[in-house]
Image: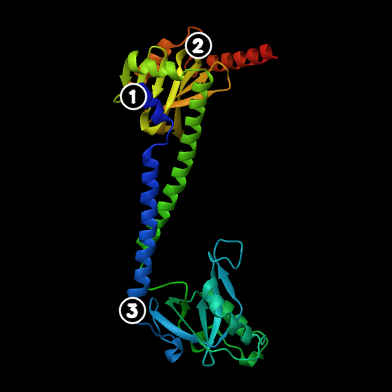
Amino acid sequence: MNGKEILKKAKHMPKHFGIIYLICIIIIIGSIFIGGYKLENEKPNATDFTQNGAIGLEPEKYVYMQVEGLTDVIATYGTNDNTYSDENDKYYIAISDGYWYIVNLDSIGLEELKEIQEYTFGNIENKPAPVTIYGITEEIPTELKEIVISVYNEGIPEEEQISMDEFELYFGSVLLNARRTPSDLTIETVAIGIAVIVIFVTIIVHIANKITRTRIMKYLKKNGYEDDLITQLDDNVEEKFYNDKVIITKDYFVDTTNGSFCAVKFSDIKWIHTHRVKYYGVITVSSDIILHLKDCKTNFQCLNIKGNITPEFESVFDKICSKMPSDSLKGYTAENINEFKQYKKDLKNNAI
């Protein structure tokens, strides 16, 4: 690849971003399609939840019931501060054929039963037709039982109130969770979640890559380096590293590793040092080279590698150091940090 092709390629984003987006979109659409198919075609036959008043019914059964009345929410469980958030479990008492049952509804299920709920509270006169809901049976937590008993006993004479021992006779052995379906969508849900995370991370990397490329191209254009860089990439290459992805010419350092692009003239570099990402004191993520230019406004992050610094990485670093001006700073030391700060301060004062 000649100099003109390298520079032309540097102006465009790598194709792998588009490939990642496409794969993630395919995974999301495919998972939604498969999940929809499962919901429509893999449901077992539902049994009547209200048969025998739900007494003796086991958990994890797919059931249905016809709802003729519905209370307001009696209990919520979850981490969201918003009581009515669909992230929380919301429990209601549903009435069917005069008997009370505990159901767990999301906002969609509640919307379907809204008219019945309005009739239950006497807000409308005409009794709506019963609505059939489906779900999975679950054990009733003791705390929820206590809440339901408290709701039931409120406002009625003491002699007619019920105790925990009588709970099943009035509300059944299990509750109906209408938020759950009999189809196992774990794989599809995980796949969609991972794909969304990958897209989000890729967008961040994409934007960062775009910003870096724009800065590099502005730097080259502003200083009139483009033609000279192309010529040197064709005729004055001195050394190459990382499978020809890192190129050292007579006057320029060029990095095209990992789909990135960085091109800097050695004479413009004031300070060079390495940077390592650490977690809990251990190098676990990456190492790269940071180049601070003489204007003290521009710096570039180049040659990002995973893990520890390698001999090849050190060779690139040493090669750049050997080509930099004699008054440049090399290495991340306290002395160089202070000297660069002073240089920056002096530059600002002279500009004023």
Task: Say which amino acid is labelled 2.
Answer: Ser
Instruction: Find numbered disc 2 in the image and state the secondary structure of the residue it sits on.
Output: loop
Query: Considering the image in quadrants, where does the C terminus appear?
Result: top right
Instruction: Give the image location of residue 144, x and y in percent.
Output: 54, 75
Q: Quadrant of residue 160?
A: bottom right
| Farthest left residue in view | 243
Circle 1 is placed at which residue position?
Answer: 310
Is 196 placed above or below 251 here? below
Q: Are marks 2 and 3 in contact (CB under 8 Å)?
A: no
Is residue 325 visible in the rendered image? The answer is yes
Task: Say which amino acid is labelled 1.
Answer: Thr
Q: Are marks 2 and 1 in contact (CB under 8 Å)?
A: no
Instruction: Give the image location of residue 329, x and y in percent.
Output: 50, 13
Is 5 placed above or below 331 here? below
Q: Looking at this view, is 91 or 65 the one in front?
A: 65
Label for residue 44?
3
**Viewer-nearest of labels 1 and 3?**
3
**Mark closest to the chain's N terminus, 2 or 1:** 1
Separation of disc 1 and disc 3 at Cα?
58 Å
Task: Say which amino acid is labelled 3.
Answer: Pro
**Mark closest to the chain's N terminus, 2 or 3:** 3
Separation of disc 2 and disc 3 at Cα?
74 Å
Instruction: Find numbered disc 1 in the image and state the secondary structure of the residue it sits on.
Output: loop
